[in-house]
Amino acid sequence: GQNIDQPTEMTATEGAIVQINCTYQTSGFNGLFWYQQHAGEAPTFLSYNVLDGLEEKGRFSSFLSRSKGYSYLLLKELQMKDSASYLCAVIDSNYQLIWGAGTKLIIKP
Amino acid sequence: NAGVTQTPKFRILKIGQSMTLQCAQDMNHNYMYWYRQDPGMGLKLIYYSVGAGITDKGEVPNGYNVSRSTTEDFPLRLELAAPSQTSVYFCASSTTGTNQPQHFGDGTRLSIL
């Protein structure tokens, strides 16, 4: 079966750095997305990785290792507004998007 | 600059009733999707469409139907509502295939009692 694993919940301190991991076992790989979802709101696109390496976009960076079936989202200089769920989603060999359950990130002052 | 618009935002249905969840996008996107999101679970694809007149089943299509008569609109029909269909429903669109970012509507919170 196809599976995406993310930690259920993480806690971090305002101003710090946090890394949210995503591991996947899918039938093939054609790309990986990270989305942010604030409570009661719609998911919004953060990043897309299809090649190995680090993609940096402001305070957010996303890393991919296809050989390890692994990605992480790195959030720097955490702000209270970063409290949200972070969803990892993988495109499989049939170009179907498989979603993880998401990681709820709690930011404390 | 509306993006993806879903109506209604909230609805309570009785078991056995039917309803249509509306979704419209003004970005001229070809691909549209319907998801449901249950607490603690990932998004589950119900149906998707790659263009007007073309629809296909996703992972959890039972109990639902869709149509795509125009590029803009992609309504989701629930027939004979059941408590298991209590969920948050999201409509999304993208320019082309699944390797493009999806733009989501604000969701419809549906309770079946």
Image: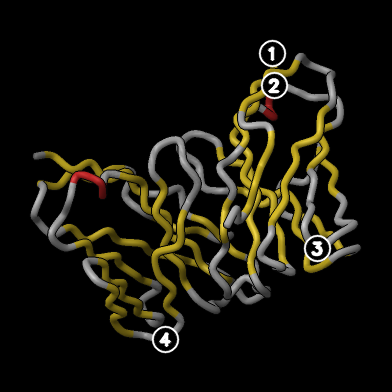
Amino acid type at image mark 4: Leu
Residues at discs 2 and 1 in contact (Cβ within 8 Å):
yes
Q: CA distance from mark 1 to mark 4?
A: 47 Å
Judging by the rendered image, the residue that carries numbered circle 4 is A51
User: Quadrant where the N terminus of chain A lies?
Assistant: bottom right
Q: At x 60% / y 53%, what residue is drawn?
A: B2
In the image, residue B22 sits, relative to residue B30, either above or below, namely above
Mark closest to the chain's N terminus, 1 or 3: 3
Question: What residue lies at 51% left-to-right and 67% top-to-bottom?
Answer: A90
The location of residue B16, given as percent across then percent down, is: 84, 18
Give amino acid for label 3. Thr
**Residue located beneath label 1 in the image:** B113
Q: Residue at position x 85%, y 43% from top?
A: B65
In the displayed structure, would residue B67 be above or below residue B30? above
**Marks 2 and 3: which is nearer the front?**
3
Q: Which mark is residue B71?
A: 3
Select label 2 or label 1 by which is in front: 1
Q: How is the image coloured?
A: secondary structure
Assess disc 2: are there few (<14), some (14-19) or many (≥20) residues with their C-alpha within 10 Å of its C-alpha.
some
Say which of B5 and B35 sits in front. Answer: B5
Q: Position of residue B44 (x, y in %)?
A: 62, 48
Which chain hosts label 4? A
Marks 1/4 in contact by CB < 8 Å: the verdict is no
Q: Which residue is the site of mark 2?
A: B83
The chain holding disc 2 is B
Q: Chain of mark 1?
A: B
Horizontal relation, residue A14 to residue B83: left or right: left
Which of the two discs, 1 and 3, sits closer to the camera? 3
